[in-house]
Amino acid sequence: MSISSSLNAGVMGLNVNAARLSTISDNIANSSTAGYKRSQVDFSSMVLQQRSSSYSAGGVRVDTFKDIATSGSLISTGSATDIAVAGRGLFPVTDEAGLKSPPSSRELRLLPTGSFYADQNGNLRTQSGLFLLGWPADSTGDIGNVSRNSGINLSPVNIATSQFTATPTSKIDLGINLPADATIAGATTGDYNLPVEYFDNLGRAHSLTFQFTPTVPASSASNQWTVNIFDSAGDPAVSIGTLDLEFSDTAASGGRILTASASGGAAYDPVTGNLSLTLPHGPVVVYVGRINDSAGVTQLAAPFSPTAVTKDGGPIGDLSSVEIDNNGYLQAVYDTGLRRTLYQIPVGDVPNMNGLNALDAQAFAISASSGSLYLWDAGAGPVGGISGFSLMESTTDIAAELTDLIETQRAYSSNAKIVQTVDEMLQETTNLKR
């Protein structure tokens, strides 16, 4: 019995070392494959119930697995859509069948790194046919309330619909100083005109003209101004709103707005300091300042100074490139300098990374051993950020693999020697009958 158990143990040793040789072959073959996770083997002994008079060899068995939890080094590339997770986690992708399937039946895969490019339809994909998934953002860059335990809200990342963009103006901030000397008795400065360019829904440029008219009293100083607003998109001679301002000249709040009231289609909110206007393309909010606040429009003994006049929106822009930042936001960069967030790429994590099922093209799938998926914001919680212009190197260490290769060869030879020895012993036993 012990001789046959020795033979079985030797044969099992040959089998497990053959399995180890297979993993070493895979690792060496993929030493230059971006995102490849090293295959490993785990030997464990088998123990048979022993009798007091003899010993039976149980043998050895092997478990193979991918060391997915280990991250490879990142290398820089020249493409903005070469991305990698800098740390723990994998980002979601799907295959071509999933591209055409509804989210509820799409096969979700996970990838540590990928070199993506836009195909003929504008979808970002790898050469191996994996399509990048992300949460679509609205015009403000917000992704809203999305499911983080499934891919139900994920969509294929498509940049074809973003080749051109026009962002209408919705907010204007006025940082202006009005000269205090213009409201004293006998002042002859006249009006001060401030044109501010804005953009409508089609990307056309128009201008709002703010006409500041001081109230000149017969004596002393009034500290009062009338602001008429004209829009070039309509009748430029007709005011679309009027704002009456009075400024304080006290020691505590000199130069700040004391009172403000709007009329003629405009509305002033003293809580926010915003002046609401209705333009042909929609509402626009103009920040003029709150009561007794130093921001916005002031009246000091200084020249007329529009030093901080800003607005949002932009003209028609042609898409020049896309970039992915460390937080996973994929932004379209237009030739006008405008940046627009199109998608947020999440980073998935599971309790047991090494329990994921390995698929072709360095992709992985959820399994019962891995645990449930959770989609984090890149760089949040336990997951790493997403690095653009980067690819992850293979986790294979050639020197270590060659060392393991030598050890495996010696172990295989030793087990073969056991089989040979048992064969010789059995032959001797057979010869005893002669």
Image (cartoon, rainbow, N blue to C red):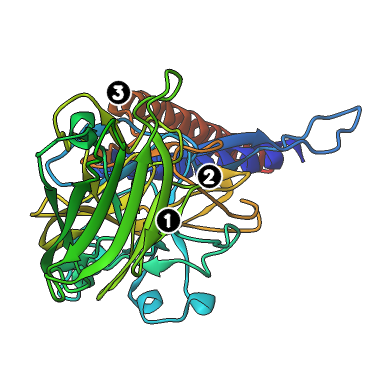
Query: What type is the residue that disc 1 sits on?
Result: Tyr
Q: Badge 2 is on which residue?
A: 64
Q: Secondary structure at mark 3?
A: helix
Q: Residue at x 18, y 35 (%)?
A: 182
> Of the residues under marks 2 and 1, which one precedes in the sequence?
2
Residue 317 seen in render: yes
Mark 3 and mark 1 residues within 8 Å of each other at the beta carbon: no
Foreground pick, 271 / 19: 271
Assign the N terminus to one quadrant of the image.
top right
Mark 2 and mark 1 residues within 8 Å of each other at the beta carbon: no
Tag on residue 268?
A: 1
Q: Residue at x 43, y 31 (%)?
A: 408
Position of residue 328 measured from the top left corner of the image (x, y, whole percent): 37, 47
Position of residue 126 measured from the top left corner of the image (x, y, whole percent): 24, 60
Mark whose residue sits in front, 3 or 1: 1
Q: Secondary structure at mark 2?
A: strand
CA distance for labels 2 and 3:
20 Å
Q: Badge 3 is on which residue?
A: 399
Foreground pick, 32 / 141: 141
Q: Residue at x 34, y 39 (%)?
A: 326
